Amino acid sequence: MKGPATFLTGMLLALGALFHWLPLWRRENQYFGVTTPAGFERTPEGRRALRRFRIWLWLGTAVAIMLTAAATEAGWRPLAPAGTLVQTITVIAAFAVVHRQLTPYAIEPQPRTASLDPDRERLPGGLAAAMIPVAILAAAAIYVATHWELLPDRIPVHWGLDGRPNGWADRTPRGVAGPLVVGFMLWGVMLGSAIAILKGSPRPSGESADWTRRFRRANLRLLMALVWTMPLLFAGIAVRPVFEAQSITIPVWLITVAPLVAILAYTIPIIRLSRETGSGGDSTPDRCWYWGQFYYNRADPALMVEKRFGVGYTLNFANPVSWLFLAIPVAVVFGVRWLR
């Protein structure tokens, strides 16, 4: 099996392992997007549901791996990543089918109650600290501009698994500024998501209020870690050619590993929280969760609600502001393509 196929196969297996356990990372009273009694996953019906999901997951993963290998061996490299799409569609479809099969076991969620206390919660580190990464990007831009003559004619902007560059940009203002602009856009996406969760997610009272608060804080810490690490990553990519011209080497792995370490370090507490007992339910009506994954509720003013598949938050697609959030990633993708 060729190098790219080996990498993609490893990625598909890693994603398969993630999806294998993902249905168990949820509130205690939710199972495959359905509000169920606590401990339902240990019943015969719950075990069968999980087994069906995992069977379809690994069948889809096997098909994805074969498609990847065949495309690579035949020289159809643009089709090789299609295996990831096949796997993702299989997971979404399998979750939706199991969700529908479990609806007869649903119980009525507890009515949502909101706290009347003033909300004094703030972003971890504060909004002022979140501006520092922008200053770092600006400093990197000034540094590169003042050392323009040290830049090579072609600048590496992407590297393979072996650490060798395989993507290049010309020494033009657009090519040189590309990583810095991408870093700024990602900074905005992460910070905007954190603010949306802080200001637009429910504040319930009652037994699960403490768990909800801790879960929200854990997600905010993850996003704020990315607010810092993503700009640092792209600032490092931008200044690296200048440093190398001065015989100062910044290993590529050091630049790319930092965001991965941050994601892992701040995701593990979220997973642990999702496995705690006493978390209850999220009080959102099951009928507003389409396929158990997409929330659409005109009667709910919340912009962000907790996911029922995976960890973190998702949009209330009935909220008009949600469509702005959907447009931002599209703009980022088109922005990156324009810069390239």
Image (tube, rainbow, N blue to C red):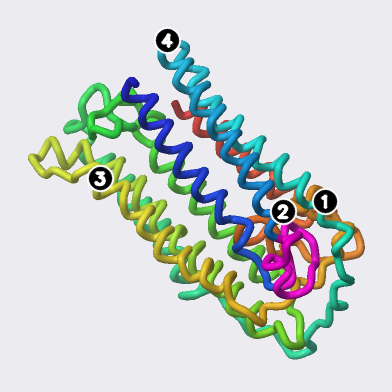
Residue type at the position of mark 2: Ala
Q: Is residue 39 magenta?
A: yes
Q: How far apart are marks 3 and 2 (CA)?
A: 41 Å
Badges 3 and 2: C-beta atoms under 8 Å apart?
A: no
| Left or right, residue 326 beside residue 146 | right
Query: Where does label 2 land, which residue?
Result: 49
- For residue 253, the mark is 3
Report x, y in % for residue 83: 54, 27
Q: How far apart are marks 1 and 4 (CA)?
A: 41 Å
Taking the spot 59% from the left edge, 70% from the top edge, the residue there is 274
Mark positioned earlier in the residue sequence (4 or 2) = 2
Report x, y in % for residue 28: 68, 73
Report x, y in % for residue 66: 50, 23
Q: How far apart are marks 1 and 2 (CA)?
A: 8 Å
Query: Where does label 4 land, which residue?
Result: 75
Report x, y in % for residue 40: 73, 68
Q: In which quarter of the image is the N terminus?
A: top left
Task: Work out whether 184 lies above or below 13.
Answer: below
Q: Does the magenta stretch include residue 150?
A: no
Q: How far apart are marks 4 and 2 (CA)?
A: 39 Å
Query: Where does label 1 land, which residue?
Result: 101
| Left or right, residue 119 beside residue 297 | left
Badges 1 and 2: C-beta atoms under 8 Å apart?
A: yes
